[in-house]
Image (spheres, coloured by chain):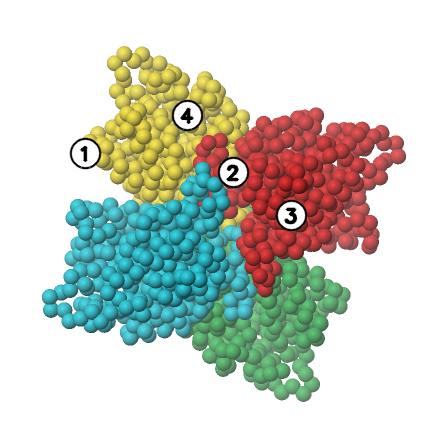
Chain colours: A cyan, B green, C yellow, D red
Amino acid sequence: MKVGVFKVAQNSPDDLSGVQALIQAQTLDPRTLVAILGKTEGNGCVNDFTRGFAVQTLKAYLRSHLPPAPTHPIVYVMSGGTEGVLSPHLTLFTREPDPVAAVPHWGLVLGISHTRDFLPEEIGTLAMVDGVAEAVRQAIAQAQLQTQDVHFVQIKCPLIASARTQGSASQQFRTQDSYKSMAYSRGASALGVAIALGEVDRASLTNADICQNDGLYSCVASTSAGIELQNCEILVLGNAPTSTSDYVIGHSVMRHALDQEAVQSAIAQTGQERDRVVNLFAKAEADPSGTLLGRRHTMLDDSDINHTRMARAVVGAVVASVLQDPMVYVSGGAEHQGPAGGGPVAAIARQRDA
Amino acid sequence: MKVGVFKVAQNSPDDLSGVQALIQAQTLDPRTLVAILGKTEGNGCVNDFTRGFAVQTLKAYLRSHLPPAPTHPIVYVMSGGTEGVLSPHLTLFTREPDPVAAVPHWGLVLGISHTRDFLPEEIGTLAMVDGVAEAVRQAIAQAQLQTQDVHFVQIKCPLIASARTQGSASQQFRTQDSYKSMAYSRGASALGVAIALGEVDRASLTNADICQNDGLYSCVASTSAGIELQNCEILVLGNAPTSTSDYVIGHSVMRHALDQEAVQSAIAQTGQERDRVVNLFAKAEADPSGTLLGRRHTMLDDSDINHTRMARAVVGAVVASVLQDPMVYVSGGAEHQGPAGGGPVAAIARQRDA
Amino acid sequence: MKVGVFKVAQNSPDDLSGVQALIQAQTLDPRTLVAILGKTEGNGCVNDFTRGFAVQTLKAYLRSHLPPAPTHPIVYVMSGGTEGVLSPHLTLFTREPDPVAAVPHWGLVLGISHTRDFLPEEIGTLAMVDGVAEAVRQAIAQAQLQTQDVHFVQIKCPLIASARTQGSASQQFRTQDSYKSMAYSRGASALGVAIALGEVDRASLTNADICQNDGLYSCVASTSAGIELQNCEILVLGNAPTSTSDYVIGHSVMRHALDQEAVQSAIAQTGQERDRVVNLFAKAEADPSGTLLGRRHTMLDDSDINHTRMARAVVGAVVASVLQDPMVYVSGGAEHQGPAGGGPVAAIARQRDA
Amino acid sequence: MKVGVFKVAQNSPDDLSGVQALIQAQTLDPRTLVAILGKTEGNGCVNDFTRGFAVQTLKAYLRSHLPPAPTHPIVYVMSGGTEGVLSPHLTLFTREPDPVAAVPHWGLVLGISHTRDFLPEEIGTLAMVDGVAEAVRQAIAQAQLQTQDVHFVQIKCPLIASARTQGSASQQFRTQDSYKSMAYSRGASALGVAIALGEVDRASLTNADICQNDGLYSCVASTSAGIELQNCEILVLGNAPTSTSDYVIGHSVMRHALDQEAVQSAIAQTGQERDRVVNLFAKAEADPSGTLLGRRHTMLDDSDINHTRMARAVVGAVVASVLQDPMVYVSGGAEHQGPAGGGPVAAIARQRDA
């Protein structure tokens, strides 16, 4: 299966002019779409409706361009928050049968999967970890990937909206705080990836580890919580020798928010020059220690602006300054995604011209 | 006169433990203090009282450590806003008679000056430009600097608080909006620097140019508005052959918020390695075109977070990622300070060990 | 024509469960819909996409429930911002032929109209005032209302998004600041109402009066700006002897944000008890003098939270405390809508049971 | 002892012009000051330095007006947050020996006390509850009050700043989240009042009840957390037959944020007309159920503005609209202070002219 990657700007969450242009020019065949990752311009926190607005718009548009019974559902991952220089955009992933004369080569492959809906009381628990791990394994198998060649696993996961906890005994939930529940959901999802990839040992994992034991993490997980779904949707990206894609992926792990060497390293791993990079994908979080490189930061004590927002602004600026392109995908909240205060970063580059 | 530079962390706007330690260790003689630049952890906008709190605390402390009638007033420039990784701190500048056996060499010198109080209706007008230009010239003369060797001019300037416009005919003010008045004050002050340094021609300058004609700017001005003063306080920094300082300064101009090459260039100009840099000083603004490197940014249409805050987070991250130290001085609002969307950046490095 | 009024709660901008229930129960015939006023839970400022999300959702839903070529377009007025206790909801207005045996009586009537699209440079100018005045007159005529019996004129008007000012000479626009442009648009629209109703004299009105001369205002205008349209959409409400509606409307003018007597007075004017009130409609603004009842308020100098948001929280609380129901319609920015710091308030009550 | 009450406006946290005027006019004798309650214009959350700024300013000023060794420390309670119409001000309480010819009568008395410093790990636990209960009893005894005649107990309590949890095992703290720690501190302090007054049974109280069991509460506690202290400072107000004060106090309990009847009732309880009320003191919180009077509110899911800020705006507007004076004391976070979503409200009125 040949994988394609397209990056298009959005002027608002419901702007599909870029997608439309690609489809009308027959550059993009909507029937081949498997996943759409977006950065939308909301606050990226609980009451961010730009994610749902973008998805509703995309679905309505594609419905009129797709056969009535699609063989597979598209994975939509809208990550809210384009703080600072981050520029709202969509990254569209396609998959189509290998062209007749295609010669397999080392390059990009992908797999997708969905978990069942989780109950609010399962969010942030081992039940969620296990459900995600199982689905990640399915997506890896679908992509015909070796575990060590997985470079990025993107997950969209649910949160606990305050409306959903009413009428339930409060002790059943990891938290009553909807903003905080986003962290639990992201953390459990990331640990699911780590289990599937053998980065963390399932046997010794407990509920208490989730969002507490920051020594446990995945180097390739990127998870993003939203109010618009109740299950997890998963996209696995990696390289395989069976690829017929024009693209290739590399990754690294930022040890802290200012680790520009890791960004350079992710690009270098693709074997391509910087100007062939289509997009960078990174996770951001305010260092939970309250310090960065030995200096105090104020993000955790700021009651005016949520620290996830500031973390995106910072990592977005660092990643964009390396690429000299602010249209990159940086999502917030890196619980169990890379070391505390850091996070995975992946680069997709074009390796040959179609 | 020998110039010294000290950078100390602050745990809160009223934390002087770092300053106290320097004084008690006799590393810093408070009687030699001429200027204190601070980054404080407020919003950097109108209702930021961290600036005034820091100044009140410093003044009360120094009052008990200084002779009753100081020969010169200290210049206090508190710039609010430590968004993202920026770490609250003070940079203290001292000046003392040359040591007996000192051999003059190329290095850091400084001058300070104060304007008269400006009326609210003068803020953002040519009257302010001229007052500032005159005071900048005085500070340059005091420092025995050549115009071309001026590397950084820091100014603290007033704003128009809404309380001060009550009871006056509204048409007298450049704006009734206190947040907007900060921009006019910064812009007029920066043009004052540009006039003094010959970067802009006074004869053809009009009131209408101020905060409108962004082709006019200074490459070394850094201006910061605050509610806590009604005049301008000025600090001029440069290099001269008569210096006996252990420090040296360099500068460059960031063409846009992600211009890390300019930051490297400012450091290179000091002739010192990165690890000898004491502090970096930069200005930040959201590109007024609404785009950066051809990509849309959302800072100007964000009604939740002021764009000056986001701009500081971005430029702070870029500057800090070059230095690998988040304790840098980045202040917001770069009207007439560097080209639109960019701004000056200066580096002070230690060139010899005291 | 018989006018109906329905108030339904929304759990999110795309929640139509309440509307669906009314339609399925045949309480509401979608073909009779003429206007939908909503309070959505965004910031009510520039980057509030909840308004567009709600409208997109409503339109998609109604498209499948309406005949392909509707005889009239529905007026959608989504007002963002449910700060404090305000509860997100929709108010739906219907109009249908008089029932066969209906006896005309004093009660609610309505008219709607649309202006042409305005250019960005027309927003906030006399061109906009005139366009609105003309359309208001049309709506009044359509409703068969006497001018003195008009109790509420709701207008949805455009703003100047920063994207729309790029590539144009800047001096053409009333402002480059998109947030500020909302005020100009609301102000000019409100003056259009005042002209149509004879509250302000057109001959002596100038562009300079708009958003400056706060002695000029309408006592019944309520205008709300949004990024999702480029023309004005108008809904006129009043009482007439020809009505066959079960509802009646009254109004008053709040002199300041804490004027609960005006709210009581609007209710009293309907001639009905408080518990028969369906909804209250009010405008809110932070008193531009910076004081309220002689006391300083801090809303205008607050750089963390926009004053329109705080004003809605305040007036929402006052109006809701009188009605003892937080599901009321309070919209922000009351330029030329009532006296400075105050604004119109209208009450619709059920006068007889259907 | 004769108790006096003074309310003075502040133009900024460091504005003492009003206090100065009272002292210079000899209306207020600074040596008689026992407590100062302030509303300052910060965010009222973690990084609100307006509280500390106000206290520092007051202390420095009073130091120069008080004898070197005061017989008692003054209780400073600065409550941050003047959202909406709330007007920044100070309420000063004095206590002096009964005038020679004074005839005791039913009226205002007060007592003050301080707890020891609490460790960060004690904040929000029974250790804090017990420490506060003991100190409240002392203050009641000092005031010579009967338990049933206590009308208001104001406490300033500490929070857990993220800096203070570094280097400690995380499980020791009720929370690592500094904003959340304010709730635990307020809640434990309020339960301390409830224990002291017999409103809650100490024997059956457990750590798990704190901030969880909202059936337990005090009807007169008002607690406010701040970063500027590590112990609790307590002010008890009530009426006694031994009073020689010109003032009298009454209170009631708001059942919800829109309960204006309770505000009227607190005023009525003083036996005085509305225009003799000096100040109202109320607590505010967003109803933790997510609904108010059966309607959904959005405060708990708002990631842009903290719900404590919105709650103050709402209750401030309701209280101020009853009094028709926005200079009232409304503080946020009503854990165990009145029923869930509601809170105590007290009124101090002048009953006779001095």
In three-dimensional space, the C-alpha distance between marks 2 and 1, rounded to whole angstroms, equals: 45 Å
Which residue is found at the position 26% from the left and 20% from the top?
C97
Q: Which residue is mark 1?
A: C68
The chain holding disc 1 is: C
Q: Which residue is mark 2?
A: D287
Mark 3: amino acid: Leu
The chain holding disc 3 is: D
Of badges 3 and 4, the one in the foreground is: 3
Which residue is found at the position 39% from the left and 71% from the top?
A262
Of badges 3 and 2, the one in the foreground is: 3
Neighbour tally class for label 4: few under 14, some 14-19, many 20 plus, Cα within 10 Å: some
Q: Are marks 2 and 1 on the same chain?
A: no
The chain holding disc 4 is: C
Mark 1: amino acid: Pro
Q: Which residue is mark 3?
A: D126
Neighbour tally class for label 2: few under 14, some 14-19, many 20 plus, Cα within 10 Å: many
User: Considering the numbered disc 3 on the image, is that residue within a helix, a strand or a loop?
Assistant: helix
In three-dimensional space, the C-alpha distance between marks 3 and 1, rounded to whole angstroms, equals: 67 Å
